[in-house]
């Protein structure tokens, strides 16, 4: 990799992994990004930062997914940690840049809101750069910094900041909302994440992939399969050894099964936020049914310990698959019945329709992903655009709605249940016989994989060292992108709409915090 | 109103607490101590977190470390699994008798991965119906008798956990749910991780597992009021 | 009596002179001492007048013209007593309070003017003829202009004071016109002669007099539609001036309405009472709506004064209507309600305005969005103002509850009027009163909570210091009165029945307040209903009237229509509290309370910017009544950097007062058009208008003399 002046492009990356890489000097970065040929449907995935040996220790990769099954990477190698910000051109890079600034100490020139993001000021001094590996050393001591003062942008008579959390409501993940208001309607919302920052990426460093896999599964335990799949796929791509066909198809089935469970949970959250407890409890019971089935057929209620680099750790056999398909049909049709009754319930519709509207253009600017993005009119689904596992064999139907409001998101979640059930039913008949695991021994290098997790595009970027151990792993979770877009959706809506809009986003804090 | 009838019409989904044979899948099971056949060799490296040890001709399980990676569940691993859910261990006496019929629980997410919290949420759902035991989830620690902590206690949540405990009236108990809350679990070595609730607040009842299923959490909460669930569950080799 | 009053007038002049002449540091104390005596003396005059009724004092006989005289009435005596109470508290409060103006303004002129003001208020209330009344009125207006103008270095003060003077003069001109018509028609300036002659006046002229005087006096009382001067004048005036303005001077407008319509001239028609009722309802509604949403304490109190004047006017309207329909007993109920409300309002509003002064002095701010947590710093003040807050929010057992309850009851009794339209009008006004009571409760809970409780919202609020002992004594005096007026309403009602005897056609208070001693004399359903309610308890120890308000139904055997006794309520409350306390002690033996840091939802700290503001708390009301308060008058300006990052949102609320928006501005527009025609005459200065008012008065007098 060179740090050449000016941009030059090349097609690099491991086999089965079409990525167009543009190398550029730091100074030219904004210009390069600005001049990228515009492609509707291009999605900013994230920013990978690595610290390498001098003389050019700073190595940054900006990742986009192209609508045509390939990836676009802008690669920057720099001598000192001062890189121009691209967030004015690509707003979705806002939070990735803040994260890199906090963890590596890179000053993104031109970014208006750096500081306190991943590492909270109360817990870590401003000088902490825990992710640096070469200079600056490992880890950090938790040296407390200053008390955090939330930035305020609203100047209105009687304006104030309404704090919510990090511990709030009954059973909620820890996150803090800072809602600026003069009462009733939200004039400006800020989300303060990373109360749950566990440093997963750092924890992975130095471990073999099969150990790091445990961490990947536990980034977001409710979508463990998606995380394990993205991680395993990246490692397999590096090894150039795809998993056997049966394993690929079973992975697909597992991923869809997980999608169904996750969506049922999200729908339950939406219904619960509108205060309709009977249908909400219906859906919670359906979710429990799926959890029990997971444990019965695969051993673990959240499907931990199944997907591994090289394939799967177990094979439940044809009888179990048939039973799962039948059960999926039973549960999904039950859930759909509840959902369809809800669409005739005025008190439900009143609270979802025309709240939390994100128009398609705004959703594109924000770089939203997954069902939330599809509810704002984009046909964006990595199972179709960048097929992985067995999705090229069973392309899913993509549910798209255009209104971009809470009800559109509800309908997308609902329709995706149907589509996933359909996929499972197809898969049961298409899964070939054969082994479910193959040797996978990757060498040094890097690779990435994007999967369509239940909540959207999830990308793992992995670099292994010469011993086959993880040198750097960067996770670009879907929830981070969608959390970034949440303030836009709640703006100008009343307080009582806030929990509902939040529920329709189907967000996970653990996913974003890592 | 239509939802009321809908609710009346739908079948009872709640698991009976008297039934000894709960449906399969309410628990993932857990490894239990297993005698080794004489002269057999056994590879302790199978467990990524050193929860399994060979100890005088038997495999000893330190379940407090187990992260449910499921690797020793494979038949070839030679470890027996029990499909029970009475996983809770109690370190201190239960709450006084006055609390027998009603306790309020404040749940603190101290950095969990989402699965533990999801199991707690299931507990309040119709299948496990926590409320029938007089156990209620409360939004404020001011009126909580029990603090239920999940997650490895991150730097960001350490102070919140401590504050919540201090805000509770006495007598109070802390239940640590999941291996993360016990000792940090898979995240124990993280620079931003405290490594278990016990580092911040005194833990009275601990339930391991990754995640512990709802019935195991229920068992823990029942122990807080001096009850505990009936022993059951088969052991499969 | 004339001797007593004469001495008092001399003392008043002495007090003013001594205050003006005293060395500056001592002036305030001199004024307080002499003022206290002055108020006490006036109180004595008032009580004497109320008890023994009319006395006369001929001042100056103008041959062929009439006699300028003082002719006391018990009604006037009542208003005198109210003014004496208000001014007593104000004089006690002022020395400590005016310290905050040290170095900027001399306290002496203000205090001297206050002494004189009380003198002229007394003359207005005792005046026995039109001319004495109007002259004293005009002097009073000018003097009150000066007290509002005191803090003149603040830019908005002179304009606010001008607005007040302008409104006052406008009202004065209308009153002059009305009364000159009256005098012309009755061929006398003497009140009693007019009263005797007035029933013979032509209906058309009576209507004109009624309307002109109603709007004229309404302007002084801050009634719809001429009330926008009030919320402007109060924030500008010093707190003691505000207290006098709201506690004593607004009442003069009410007195004027009572005098004109109940003594001088019968209503031109029974339906005229509905106009009074309607004006009251409009004032109450607009007043409370703004009180519930404004965040400046003194403006809030000013809006609340408008509301209270509205409530009083509603009761007056009801009283006049009942009397016109020949329902004297109900009329009495409404008269008592009106006068009770006057008394209560003056006491608690004086308390609150002086309290606002204390807050301003202690924290240097009156905007609730920047206050908060003052209870920790101002223990006594917050306690006294709690009484005032409960009273104005009509929470039993404080003043305010009984009177508002009586107003509502008298409106509900309109079923006795055999006219569907009137009944509907009363019912609608009843809805307004109920709404106003509800909004008043939210408004004042908000006032107290945002000012005294919670977290401070600014540094100066955190640094507030308790006010001087003298000020606290004044507040304590008024706080005690609010409790007394609330706990013993039947005693107050007995006194008021006596006062209103000359106005009302009935004195049969026993119809509402059954006496302990004669239960046997009551109609049997009433007697039967009243024993189980406990009205007989303690009749051997309790003197004079009973402690329960009740009203027997006009239909036979239908029992009691309403019954209410804050006295018993407070007894029950005390017993319940005592029992709870004893129980808590018994159960909690051996346990002690532990103080912990507040639970902050897991956050490390909260600061001033993270607490709910008064604006925020009022927002739901604002949203509901957006159409009245601010239709489309907020503008958000946004600043975005780096294409996407919003870095500031500035909200501009240019809401204009609804009365200004809908009535004053269009009227002013029309008037300006008219003024262009008469441009030569008008210089647009209020001083000129004052001159015109005098000229008009003189001209009219000459006219009357000639005809
Ligand atoms: S399931 Fe638990 S005990 Fe078994 S190998 Fe995994 S971590 Fe070790
Ligand atoms: S114990 Fe396991 S399931 Fe629970 S939070 Fe930790 S990693 Fe997640």
Image (cartoon, coloured by chain):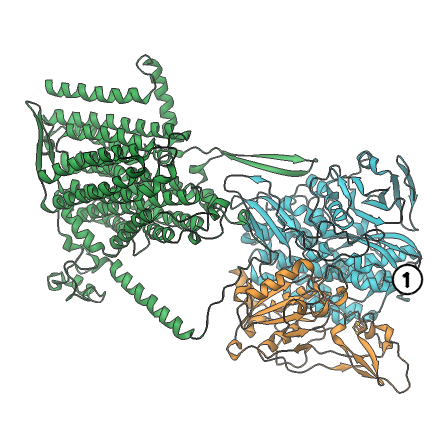
Chain colours: A cyan, B orange, C green
Q: In terms of depth relative to the viewer, which is nearer, C623 or A443?
A: A443
- Residue B156 visible in this rendered orientation of the protein: yes
Q: In terms of depth relative to the viewer, which is nearer, B88 or C241?
A: C241
- Residue C425 visible in this rendered orientation of the protein: no
Looking at the image, is C599 positioned above or below residue B213?
above
Relative side of A152 to C317, left or right: right
Dot 1: element: loop
Name the residue: 30% across, 30% down: C145
- Residue A422 in picture, x, y percent from top left: 76, 58
- Residue C153 in picture, x, y percent from top left: 40, 29
Relative side of C5 to A472, left or right: left
The crowd level at tag 1 (other Cα within 10 Å; few <14, some 14-19, many 20+) is many
Report the quarter where the C terminus of chain A lies.
bottom right
Looking at the image, is C448 positioned above or below residue C136?
below
Beta carbon at label 1 within 8 Å of ligand 1? no
| Chain assignment, label 1 | A
Q: Quadrant of residue A199?
A: bottom right
Q: Quadrant of ligand 1?
A: bottom right
* Residue behind mark 1: A244
Relative side of C646 to C140, left or right: right
Name the residue: 16% across, 46% down: C327
Q: Quadrant of residue A9?
A: top right
- Which residue ends up furthest to the left in the rendered image? C63
Looking at the image, is A461 positioned above or below residue C75?
below
Q: In terms of depth relative to the viewer, which is nearer, A35 or C85?
A: C85
Name the residue: 28% across, 61% down: C569
Report how many numbered discs are placed on residues in the image: 1
Q: In terms of depth relative to the viewer, which is nearer, C626 or B33?
A: B33
- Residue A311 in picture, x, y percent from top left: 87, 63
């Amino acid at each position: 990799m060179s740090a050449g002046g000016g941009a030059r492009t090349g097609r690099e990356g491991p086999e089965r992994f079409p990525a167009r890489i543009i190398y550029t000097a730091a100074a030219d970065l904004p210009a390069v990004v600005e001049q990228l040929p515009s492609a509707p449907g291009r999605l900013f995935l994230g920013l990978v930062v690595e610290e390498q040996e001098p003389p050019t220790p700073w190595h940054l990769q900006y990742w986009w997914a192209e609508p045509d099954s390939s990836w676009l990477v802008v690669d920057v190698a720099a001598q000192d940690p001062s890189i121009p910000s691209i967030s004015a051109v690509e707003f979705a890079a806002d939070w990735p840049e803040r994260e890199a600034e906090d963890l590596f100490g890179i000053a993104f020139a031109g970014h208006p809101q750096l500081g306190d993001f991943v590492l909270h000021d109360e817990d870590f001094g401003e000088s902490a750069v825990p992710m640096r590996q070469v200079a600056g050393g490992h880890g950090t001591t938790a040296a407390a910094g200053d008390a955090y003062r939330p930035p305020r942008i609203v100047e209105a008579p009687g304006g104030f900041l309404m704090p919510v959390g990090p511990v709030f409501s009954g059973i909620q993940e820890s996150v803090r909302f800072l809602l600026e208001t003069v009462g009733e309607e939200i004039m400006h919302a800020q989300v303060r994440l990373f109360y749950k920052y566990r440093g997963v990426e750092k924890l992975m460093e130095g471990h073999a992939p099969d150990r790091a896999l445990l961490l990947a599964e536990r980034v977001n335990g409710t979508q463990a399969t998606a995380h394990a799949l993205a991680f395993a796929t990246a490692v397999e791509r590096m090894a150039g050894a795809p998993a056997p066909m049966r394993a690929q198809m079973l992975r697909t089935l597992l991923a869809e099964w997980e999608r169904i469970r996750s969506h049922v949970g999200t729908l339950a959250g939406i219904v619960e936020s509108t205060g309709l407890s009977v249908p909400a409890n219906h859906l919670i019971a359906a979710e429990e049914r799926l959890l029990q089935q997971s444990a019965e057929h695969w051993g673990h209620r959240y499907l931990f310990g199944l997907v591994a680099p090289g394939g799967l750790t177990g094979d439940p056999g044809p009888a179990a698959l048939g039973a799962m398909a039948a059960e999926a049909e039973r549960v999904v049709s039950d859930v759909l019945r509840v959902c369809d009754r809800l669409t005739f319930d005025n008190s439900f519709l009143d609270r979802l329709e025309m709240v939390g509207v994100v128009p398609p253009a705004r959703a594109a600017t924000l770089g939203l992903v997954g069902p939330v993005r599809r509810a704002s009119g984009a046909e964006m689904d990595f199972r179709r655009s960048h097929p992985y596992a067995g999705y090229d064999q069973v392309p899913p139907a993509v549910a798209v709605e255009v209104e971009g409001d809470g009800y559109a998101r509800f309908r997308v979640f609902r329709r995706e249940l149907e589509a996933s059930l359909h996929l499972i039913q197809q898969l049961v008949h298409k899964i070939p016989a054969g082994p479910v695991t193959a040797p996978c021994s990757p060498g040094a290098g890097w690779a990435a994989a994007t999967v369509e997790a239940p909540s959207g595009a999830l990308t793992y970027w992995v670099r292994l060292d010469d011993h086959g151990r993880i040198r750097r792993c960067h996770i670009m979770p879907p929830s981070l992108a969608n959390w970034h877009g949440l303030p836009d959706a709640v703006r100008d809506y009343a307080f009582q709409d806030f929990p509902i809009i939040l529920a329709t986003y189907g967000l996970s804090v653990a996913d974003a915090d890592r | 109103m239509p939802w009321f009838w809908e609710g009346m019409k739908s079948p009872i989904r709640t698991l009976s607490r008297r039934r000894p044979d709960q449906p399969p899948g309410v628990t993932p099971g857990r490894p239990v101590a297993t005698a080794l056949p004489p002269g057999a060799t056994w590879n302790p490296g199978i467990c990524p977190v050193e929860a399994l040890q060979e100890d005088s001709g038997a495999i000893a399980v330190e379940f407090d470390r187990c992260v449910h990676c499921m690797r020793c569940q494979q038949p070839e691993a030679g470890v027996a699994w029990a499909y029970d859910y009475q996983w809770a261990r109690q370190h201190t006496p239960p709450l006084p008798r006055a609390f027998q019929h009603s306790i309020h629980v404040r749940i603190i997410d101290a950095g969990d991965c989402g699965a533990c919290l999801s199991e707690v949420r299931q507990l309040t759902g119709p299948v496990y119906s926590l409320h029938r035991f007089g156990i209620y989830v409360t939004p404020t620690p001011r009126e909580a008798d029990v603090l239920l902590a999940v997650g490895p206690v991150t730097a960001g949540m350490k102070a919140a956990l401590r504050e919540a405990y201090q805000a509770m009236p006495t007598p109070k108990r802390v239940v640590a749910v999941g291996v993360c809350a016990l000792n940090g679990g898979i995240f124990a070595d993280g620079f931003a991780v405290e490594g278990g609730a016990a580092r911040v607040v005194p833990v009275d009842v601990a339930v391991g597992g990754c995640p512990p299923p709802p019935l195991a959490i229920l068992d823990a909460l029942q122990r807080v009021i001096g009850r505990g669930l009936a022993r059951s569950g088969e052991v499969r080799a | 009596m004339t001797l007593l009053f004469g001495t008092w007038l001399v003392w008043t002049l002495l007090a003013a002179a001594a205050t003006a002449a005293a060395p500056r540091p001592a002036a305030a104390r001199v004024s307080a001492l002499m003022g206290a005596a002055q108020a006490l003396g006036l109180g004595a005059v008032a009580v004497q007048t109320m008890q023994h009724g009319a006395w006369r004092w001929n001042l100056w006989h103008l041959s062929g013209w009439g006699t300028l005289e003082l002719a006391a009435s018990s009604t006037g005596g009542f208003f005198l007593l109210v003014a004496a109470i208000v001014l007593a508290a104000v004089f006690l409060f002022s020395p400590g309070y005016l310290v905050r103006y040290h170095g900027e303004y001399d306290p002496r002129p203000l205090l001297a003017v206050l002494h004189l003001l009380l003198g002229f208020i007394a003359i207005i209330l005792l005046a026995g003829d039109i001319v004495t009344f109007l002259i004293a009125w005009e002097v009073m207006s000018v003097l009150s202009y000066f007290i509002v103008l005191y803090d003149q270095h603040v830019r908005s003060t002179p304009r606010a004071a001008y607005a007040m003077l302008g409104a006052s003069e406008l009202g004065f001109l209308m009153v002059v016109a009305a009364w000159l018509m009256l005098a012309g028609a009755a061929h006398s300036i003497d009140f009693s002669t007019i009263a005797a002659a007035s029933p013979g006046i032509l209906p058309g002229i009576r209507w004109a007099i009624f309307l002109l005087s109603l709007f004229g006096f309404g302007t002084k009382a801050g009634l719809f539609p001429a009330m926008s001067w009030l919320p402007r004048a109060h924030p500008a005036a010093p707190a003691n001036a505000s207290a006098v303005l709201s506690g004593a001077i607004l009442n003069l407008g009410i007195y004027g309405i009572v005098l004109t319509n109940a003594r001088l001239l019968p209503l031109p028609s029974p339906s005229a009472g509905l106009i009074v009722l309607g004006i009251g309802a409009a004032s109450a509604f607009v007043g409370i709506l703004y009180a519930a949403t404004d965040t400046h304490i003194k403006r809030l109190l000013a809006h609340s004064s408008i509301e209270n004047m509205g409530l009083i006017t509603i009761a007056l309207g009801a009283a006049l209507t009942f009397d016109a329909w020949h329902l004297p007993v109900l009329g009495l109920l409404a008269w008592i309600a009106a006068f009770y409300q006057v008394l209560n309002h003056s006491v608690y509003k004086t308390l609150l305005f002086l309290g606002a002064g204390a807050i301003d002095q202690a924290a240097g701010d009156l905007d609730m969005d920047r206050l908060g947590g003052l209870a920790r710093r101002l223990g006594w003040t917050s306690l006294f103002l709690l009484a005032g807050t409960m009273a104005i929010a009509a929470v039993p057992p404080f003043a305010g509850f009984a009177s508002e309850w009586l107003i509502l009851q008298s409106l509900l009794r309109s079923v006795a009027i055999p006219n569907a339209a009137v009944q509907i009008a009363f019912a609608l006004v009843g809805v307004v009163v109920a709404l106003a009571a509800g909004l008043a409760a939210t408004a004042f809970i908000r006032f107290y909570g945002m000012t005294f409780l919670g977290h401070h919202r600014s540094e100066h609020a955190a640094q507030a210091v308790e006010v001087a002992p003298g000020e606290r004594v004044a507040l304590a005096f008024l706080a005690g009165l609010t409790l007394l007026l609330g706990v013993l309403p039947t005693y107050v009602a007995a006194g008021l029945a006596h006062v209103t005897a000359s106005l009302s056609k009935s004195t049969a208070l026993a119809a509402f307040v059954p006496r302990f001693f004669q239960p046997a004399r009551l109609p049997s359903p009433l007697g039967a209903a009243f024993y189980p309610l406990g009205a007989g308890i303690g009749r051997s120890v309790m003197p004079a009237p009973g402690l329960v308000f009740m009203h027997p139904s006009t239909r036979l055997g239908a029992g009691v229509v309403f019954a209410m006794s804050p006295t018993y309520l407070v007894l029950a409350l005390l017993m319940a509290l005592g029992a709870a306390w004893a129980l808590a002690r018994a159960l909690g033996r051996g346990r002690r309370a532990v103080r912990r840091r507040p639970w902050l939802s897991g956050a490390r700290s909260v600061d001033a910017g993270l607490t709910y503001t008064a604006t925020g708390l009022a927002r739901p009301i604002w949203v509901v009544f957006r159409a009245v308060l601010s239709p489309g008058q907020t503008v958000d300006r946004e600043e975005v950097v780096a294409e996407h990052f919003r870095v500031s949102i500035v909200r501009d609320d240019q809401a204009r007062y609804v009365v200004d928006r809908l009535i004053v501005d269009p009227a002013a527009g029309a008037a300006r058009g008219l003024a262009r025609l008469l441009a030569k005459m008008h210089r647009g200065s209020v001083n000129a208008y004052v001159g015109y008012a005098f000229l008009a008065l003189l001209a009219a007098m000459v006219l009357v003399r000639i005809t």
